[in-house]
Amino acid sequence: MKTKRTAVLILALSFLLAGAVFIRAQEEETDVEGAKDHPLLSRMKNFYISNYLDRYDEHDFYFSESDMKTIEGDRTYLSYQLKEGVPQPSPLQIRRNYANALKTLGAKVVYEDEGYGCWTLVKGGREIWVDVQVYNDGQNYEINIVQIAAMVQEVTANEMLDALNKDGFIALYINFDTGKYDLKPESQGTIDQIIALLVDNTDLNVSIEGHTDNVGQPAANKTLSEQRARAVRDAVVKGGVNGSRVNAIGWGQERPIADNRSEDGRAKNRRVEIVKK
C-alpha cells in the first residue's frame, strides 16, 4: 500500500516529467500537431507553425487602413513563429516575399501597408482572398487564406415548412454581389430546398420577398430588391414549380429587422423571405 508521502513524490515526479516534455517540445520548435502549409503558399525559412485552423469560417480582409470586407468560405489560418538563434527577417522582407509569390499566381493587390498585405485571385474557378500580417518586427506572422465556397445547406425543406406553418414566413440569406441580382452558385442549395418544399406541398403558395439595408437610394434599393426576388422566383419556376404558385415582391429598405447602424444589422436586413400566402 502506497503511503501519502509516496503518492506526493509520484505526483511531483509526474509534474517534472510533464514539464520536461513541454520544454523539449519548445526546444524542438516543431509545427503544432496536424498543421501544414497551405498548398498555395510555402513558409518563410526558419519558421514553424505555432497555431493552425482549417475549416469553413469567415475573416475580415482590409482594403484600407480602416475599411474591411468580411469573406466567408474554406478558411486556412496559419501563425508562424521564428526559431531561436536564426537571422530575423524584416516585416518588409516577409510581406514582399508573399507579394511576389502571389503575383506569380496572378493575384491582384487589394491593400498593403508596412506590416500587412491583402490580395485576391481566381484559381480553379474559385475566388481566393489572402492576407499576411507581420508582428514583433518579423518574429511572427499570420496568413489567412479564404476560398469562397458554398456553405453546406443546413435549412431543409421540412424546416422551411415548419417555419411557414408557425410564423408564416422564413428569412433566407441568399448571397448576391453588391448592387447585382444575379444568383451566385453557392445559393443553389437554398434554391433546391425551396423547390423541394413546393414540390412536396402542392397546396402551398408563397411570395418571395426581397429586402435590402439602407445603404444607397431608397428607390434604387426597392428596384434591386424586386430584381433579386424575381431572380429567386425564376430559379424556382425553372426547377419545376408552377409559376402561378409563386410571386415576387421587393420591399427595398422599408422593412428592416435589425439596426442599420451596424454592419451586422445591415447584413441581417439584406435578406430574401419566403412568405406563406
Image (cartoon, rainbow, N blue to C red):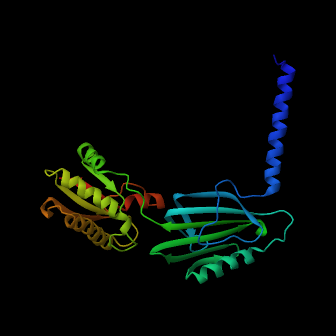
Q: Residue furthest front?
A: 1
Residue 105: image location, x then y, percent: 57, 81
In the foreground, 268 or 260: 268
Question: Seen from this angle, which residue lies furthest top?
Answer: 1
Residue 227 found in image quarter: bottom left
Q: Residue 78 versus residue 246: which sits nearer the camera?
A: 78
The answer to whether one can see residue 212 in this image is no
Q: Quadrant of the N terminus?
A: top right
Of residue 211 and residue 141, the one placed in the foreground of this image is 141
Q: Position of residue 235 (x, y in %)?
A: 25, 67
Is the residue 109 above or below the residue 153 in the image? below
Residue 52's quadrant in the figure? bottom right
In this rendering, is residue 1 above or below 175?
above
Place of residue 259 in the rendered image (x, y in percent of width and height, measured from the top left) = 43, 56
Question: Height in image: 245 above or below 14?
Answer: below
Is 23 positioned to the left or the right of 207 in the image? right
The residue drawn where x is 58% and y is 71% is 130
* Left or right: 163 in relation to 40: left
Q: Is residue 267 left or right of residue 21?
A: left
Is there any visible trace of residue 109 in the rendered image?
yes
In percent of the image, x 16 and y 51: which residue is there? 204
10 lies above or below 116: above
Image x and y of residue 68, in percent: 55, 69
Q: Residue 21 occupies which quadrant of the picture?
A: top right
Point 56% across, 74% down: residue: 63
Count the labels in the image. Answer: 0
